Image: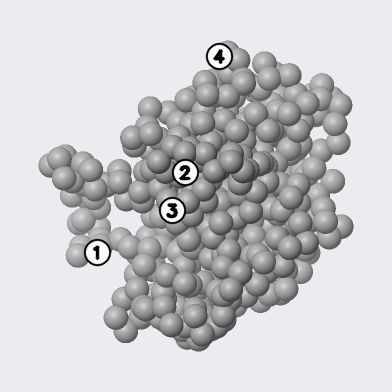
């Protein structure tokens, strides 16, 4: 079977809700990343055989196959198709897996995988709220309710369950959140994100242009202190998690260009990384966010590796208890985890986060001269994708 290589990886800087990317239609924002991947790789646009984009809230401006709409908003020819993926927060990581599988099988030679989410223009939970208001029902079927009687699936509940089950106190969550900001601040100040960020025009919610380009993740709190983080109110009374120890609502897009040996030869470029392993696993949908722990353990076993073989890890900071519990379960080195900060500081643009983390992981490995990187993230419904790459 052929190998899958990543030859370009890019993302926008994250935008706060109502912030510097709020005026961008998500299809147009995704198109900016698509065009950047083409430009950076030097590929003939017509040689891209498919575009697979992750997106969670596929309604409104993100409806009717956002991937195809992004293609039509980009410089790619009409001959390039597109399809959209929803594996909740892991949507674009799954898009990468599908792209890799396509080129490894030989069915295609060059595929763009990515994701987009405008959480300003299509707020979280919109696909559930609008049908409910219209009397069109809910995703919870009678069979699901019978299997999970009285259960209201909630990521917030899952985060609290993990904190309790793993003995993680609020003070530890607060300290972790501060470290996420500190790492993101340090990375920004030394230009660690410069090579991965696609500059796009600032476009405000009212449609006015800011007269500058957006190149710095807007969610980073450069003035963050432990006191300010600790002062944020609890999400649930008697709980441990707060908005300050959870991922930030974010607008953004990201993507990678994946090719096999034939695609690599046609491009004549040096690959950034090789896909070494990819898998996905289902887990308890009630605790929901714990899936990355057993999924990573199984992935390492299948890859014939140990956690010590991995130089850097990106574990999505949906809520601080998730990466902290992951470190405990894997007995992993905290200094290798989310070295440039995570979603608590940089934002979590849902469907775009998978290839956003992959983009950061690839560039971080290159800057540190390291070899192996692992990415995983919790996903709604109790799932987790795991991707292991080898930097080349």
Residue denoted by label 4? 78
Element assignment for label 4:
loop
Q: CA distance from mark 2 to mark 4?
A: 29 Å
Element assignment for label 2:
loop
Residue denoted by label 1? 151
Q: CA distance from mark 1 to mark 3?
A: 30 Å
Residue denoted by label 2? 204
User: Going by the picture, which residue comes out furthest to the left?
Assistant: 135
- Pick whichever of labels 4 and 1 is earlier in the sequence: 4
- Pick whichever of labels 2 and 3 is earlier in the sequence: 3
Q: CA distance from mark 4 to mark 1?
A: 45 Å
Whether 238 is drawn above or below 209: the answer is below
Q: Nearer the viewer, mark 2 or mark 4?
A: 2
Tags 1 and 2 touching, CB below 8 Å: no
Whether 162 is drawn above or below 112: the answer is below
Q: Nearer the viewer, mark 1 or mark 3?
A: 3
Q: Count neighbours of disc 3 (C-alpha within 10 A) and say few if under 14, some if 14 to 19, many if 20 or more.
A: many
Image coords of residue 81 (percent x, y): 54, 20
Residue denoted by label 3? 17
Q: Quadrant of the N terminus?
A: top right
Q: Which mark is residue 384?
A: none
- Pick whichever of labels 1 and 2 is earlier in the sequence: 1
Q: CA distance from mark 4 to mark 3?
A: 32 Å
- Pick whichever of labels 4 and 3 is earlier in the sequence: 3
The residue lying at 60 percent from left, 15 percent from top is: 77
| Nearest the eye: 168 or 68 | 68
- Pick whichever of labels 2 and 4 is earlier in the sequence: 4
Q: Count neighbours of disc 1 (C-alpha within 10 A) and say few if under 14, some if 14 to 19, many if 20 or more.
A: few
Q: CA distance from mark 2 to mark 3?
A: 10 Å
Q: Nearer the viewer, mark 4 or mark 3?
A: 3
Asked where in the image residue 3 lies, by quadrant, the reply is top right
Q: CA distance from mark 1 to mark 2?
A: 40 Å
């Amino acid at each position: 079977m052929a190998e899958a290589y990543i030859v370009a990886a890019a993302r926008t800087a994250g935008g706060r809700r109502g912030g510097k990317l709020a005026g961008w239609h998500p299809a147009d924002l995704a198109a900016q990343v698509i065009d950047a991947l083409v430009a950076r790789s030097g590929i003939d646009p017509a040689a891209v055989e498919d575009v697979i984009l992750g997106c969670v809230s596929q309604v409104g401006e993100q409806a009717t196959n956002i991937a195809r709409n992004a293609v039509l908003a980009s410089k790619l020819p009409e001959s390039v198709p597109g399809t959209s993926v929803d594996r909740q927060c892991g949507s674009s990581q799954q898009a990468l897996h599908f792209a890799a599988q396509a080129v490894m099988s030989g069915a295609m030679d060059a595929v763009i995988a990515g994701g987009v989410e405008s959480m300003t223009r299509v707020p979280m939970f919109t696909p559930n709220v609008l049908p409910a208001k219209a009397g069109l029902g809910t995703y919870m079927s009678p069979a699901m309710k019978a299997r999970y009687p009285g259960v209201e699936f909630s990521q917030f509940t899952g985060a609290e369950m993990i904190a309790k089950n793993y003995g993680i106190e609020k003070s530890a969550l607060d300290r972790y959140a501060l470290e996420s900001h500190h790492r993101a601040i340090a990375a920004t100040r030394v230009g660690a994100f410069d090579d991965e960020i696609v500059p796009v025009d600032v476009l405000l919610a009212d449609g006015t242009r800011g007269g500058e380009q957006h190149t710095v993740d807007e969610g980073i709190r450069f003035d963050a202190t432990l006191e300010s983080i600790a002062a944020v109110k609890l999400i649930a009374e008697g709980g441990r998690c707060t908005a300050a120890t959870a991922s930030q609502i974010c607008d953004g897009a990201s993507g990678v260009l994946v090719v096999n040996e034939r695609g690599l030869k046609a491009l004549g470029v040096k690959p950034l990384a090789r896909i070494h392993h990819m898998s996905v696993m289902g887990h308890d949908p009630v605790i929901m966010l714990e899936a990355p722990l057993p999924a990573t353990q199984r992935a390492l076993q299948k890859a014939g590796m140990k956690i010590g073989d991995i130089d850097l890890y990106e574990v999505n900071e949906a809520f601080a208890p998730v990466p902290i519990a992951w470190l405990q379960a894997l007995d992993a080195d905290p200094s290798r985890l989310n070295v440039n900060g995570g979603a608590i500081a940089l934002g979590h643009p849902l469907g775009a986060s998978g290839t956003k983390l992959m983009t950061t992981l690839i560039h971080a490995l290159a800057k540190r001269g390291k070899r192996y990187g692992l990415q995983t993230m919790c996903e709604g419904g109790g799932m987790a994708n795991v991707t292991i790459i080898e930097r080349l």
